[in-house]
Image (spheres, rainbow, N blue to C red):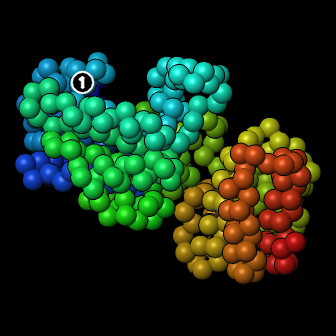
Amino acid sequence: MSGVPQFLPWQASLASRWLSSRDRFAHAWLAHGLQGIGKRQFVLAAAASLLCEAPRAGLACGRCDACLWVAAGNHPDLRRIRPDAVAMEEGADAPEESESGASAKKAPSRDIRVDQLRALHDWFNTATHRGGWRVAVLYPAEALNGISANALLKVLEEPPEHTVFLLTADAPDRLLPTLVSRCRRLPLPVPPSDECAQWLAAQGVEDPAQWLAAAGGAPLKALELSRGGDSACPRWLEQLVTPLARGAAPDVGQLADLLEKQAPAVWIDNLQRLFVDLLLAASDAPVRYFPALQASTRAAARLASPVNLAETGKWLAAQRAVANHPLNAKLLTHSALQRVALACAASSPS
């Protein structure tokens, strides 16, 4: 059935081996790995497989009653815990007005709230529908705030019977250490580039290798980028690097005008990728994100001080942390471009 979550091609083999020992399954698993490799897809497909009544090689059959319920979104033994904002991105309805009268018109929360976890208590105390597993899928675990993380920790310290928690995280070291210690870790590797390129091509992505490089090898991120841009290597980035490779100053004003039309988070992400490439090129290593600019990037890196490149890279990371709420977007754009130009001219950052 098309509605049953399926493992992505690079996940099926690992999932089959992992799920084959379900009789000795841990009560909580933390699937972690690079952003954009399909961790959410993995845990949702895993939940379907654990609930399936006739699994094949450990994976959901797609035909039994349990799979049909999962496909319809109404399996009584499955719960998804995620921020309201994520739920709405997935097509769920906006949360209803609370009992306290709070308006649902405010921006949906990007946190997993403690009341979402407290609402599971009655579910935990109810027998499973057919005597099988009860599965709670929580993603992303980074969305847990201090209160909700501690609430989940209390549940995992005394886990309900016949219940499996499946969590995802990009970086487990950002989570509450005691919470991580209550989970079995399941690292999901970055899939092979040739398999990713084939999959991207099947999704209609042209020049998949370039998009995959721009996404750092993460295929779902590459697909997202390809749907939001005309080129894996933005034209403005080429206009920035080309003069720097000659030791000339780029036209910061013109570039700033172009970038004002973009969200700061988007162009800062691209600058951060460029600086990774510059630092790699300065060490005579292959560039990672923008192979189309490799010659210019190497030439620019030869003119720059590695110390200045590293310091500017750190500065960009600090700007990225507040990119969604810049005090002055125009000033930020000019400052970032000027700083990039100075770093690549081997001058001290301002």
From the viewer's perspective, is residue 214 above or below residue 88?
below
Where in the figure is residue 14, as x and y percent of width and height?
22, 52
Residue situated in front as seen by the camera: 204 or 26 = 26
Residue situated in front as seen by the camera: 243 or 87 = 87
Task: Indicate the quadrant containing the N terminus: top left, top right, bottom left or bottom right.
Answer: top left
Where in the figure is residue 254, as x and y percent of width and height?
90, 48
List the single residue furthest toward the front: 100
Amino acid under disc 1: His
Quadrant housing residue 183:
bottom left
Q: How many marks?
A: 1
Circle 1 Cα neighbour tier, 10 Å, few/some/many (<14 / 14–19 / ≥20): some
Q: In what element is the residue under mark 1?
A: loop
Residue under numbered circle 1: 75
Task: Indicate the quadrant containing the C terminus: top left, top right, bottom left or bottom right.
Answer: bottom right
Q: Residue at x 16, y 44 (%)?
A: 161
Where in the figure is residue 59, as x and y percent of width and height?
16, 38
Task: Say left or right for 242 vs 233.
Answer: right
List the single residue furthest toward the right: 253
Q: Residue at x 22, y 20 (%)?
A: 69
Residue 190 visible in the shown view: no
From the viewer's perspective, is residue 196 above or below residue 272?
above
Task: Say left or right for 321 vs 162.
Answer: right
Residue situated in front as seen by the camera: 159 or 239 = 159
Q: Residue at x 42, y 36 (%)?
A: 116
Residue 314 visible in the shown view: yes
From the viewer's perspective, is residue 165 above or below residue 108?
below
Q: Residue at x 9, y 27 (%)?
A: 130
From the viewer's perspective, is residue 179 above or below residue 76?
below
